[in-house]
Amino acid sequence: MIEEIDKLDQEVRQSSPQPRVVRPRIIALANQKGGVGKTTTAINLGTALAATGEHVLIVDLDPQGNASTGLGIDRRSRECSTYDVLIGEAGLRQAILPTAVPRLHIAASTMDLSGLELELGTERDRAFRLRNALSALNGTNPDEAAYTYVLVDCPPSLNLITVNAMAAADAILVPLQCEFFALEGLSQLLQTVEQVRSTLNPELTIHGVVLTMFDSRNNLSNQVVADVRQFMGNKVYETMIPRNVRISEAPSHGKPVLVYDLKCAGSEAYLRLATEVIQRERELRAS
């Protein structure tokens, strides 16, 4: 009788529908130049996507940890960080913390990340640590959040951490400041993306370029916009993020600008950007 019950139980398990594992879309926000609005875009695009009903995880890979601070994560609460994940001492789920924004979580970083390249210098899988960590993210445990988007905030350099992000990502989103040297930095980044595509991740694409800190009263800003659109074509998002004092103030309060001041021009711009990102994703799935 016991054997028959065991056999019946196995048959029921095999015939029962298994929980569907949905793989999240992984988008790395990268630019080797600092001060271009990369972390600000990660925080506020993640918040805007969450506001539309998406489940979003931000992976903070910048040793400065600004994305974590900008979402109100106190440094003392970062007992397990992305550093622990990348050196193999913890799973990604252990580093994830909730934020004040519904459906938005973050894997926080610490300054320990700054020494990662030296620690992993001779490891054969050093470029795939993040990919391996993300591969087990959406399991079948119903008690764990299943993410639809993962936004990876990269450091302002083209080092091993950024290579890890590119090797794990489906696409790159490039925040680009409307300033004189914008195209020069973009060209270098595109070369790195091409190298990663040819050696580590052949599926990697450019999701889009978002122009940040745009000031319509500045002739130089308008010229940069024209040049970037001519160079990158339809890869440039229609939405441009304006210079806005509320965007600058929000991180000091540990809040995304959409929480700090929903009605300001910066918040409205990031909501439009989220709509564009989702629309591009739908077009990709349809093609």
Image: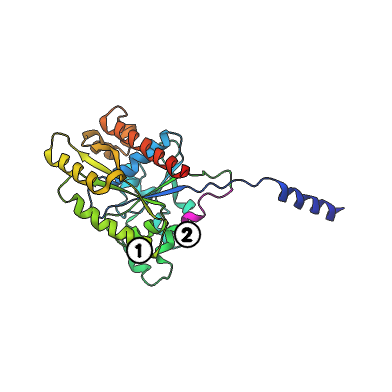
Residue placed at 46% from the left, 61% from the top? 89
Give the image's coloring scheme: rainbow
Give above or below for 253 relative to 68.
above
Q: In screen coordinates, is 122 left or right of 250?
A: right
The crowding category of the residue bearing disc 2, from other C-alpha atoms within 10 Å (few below 14, some 14 to 19, many at least 20), is some
Residue 225 lies, in percent from the top left, at 20, 42
Which residue sits furthest top? 263
Out of 39 and 251, give the one closest to the viewer.
Answer: 39
Q: What's the magenta region?
A: 132-140
Residue placed at 75% from the left, 48% from the top? 12
**Cα gap from disc 1 to disc 2, whole angstroms:** 16 Å
Residue 170 lies, in percent from the top left, at 42, 52
Question: Closer to the observer: label 1 or label 2?
Answer: 2
Could one spot residue 113 in this view of the protein?
A: no
Out of 192 and 246, give the one closest to the viewer.
Answer: 192
Residue 58 lies, in percent from the top left, at 39, 46
Which residue sits furthest right? 1
Residue 71 lies, in percent from the top left, at 35, 41
Q: Amino acid at mark 2?
A: Asn
The secondary element bearing badge 2 is classed as helix
Residue denoted by label 1: 116
Residue denoted by label 2: 132
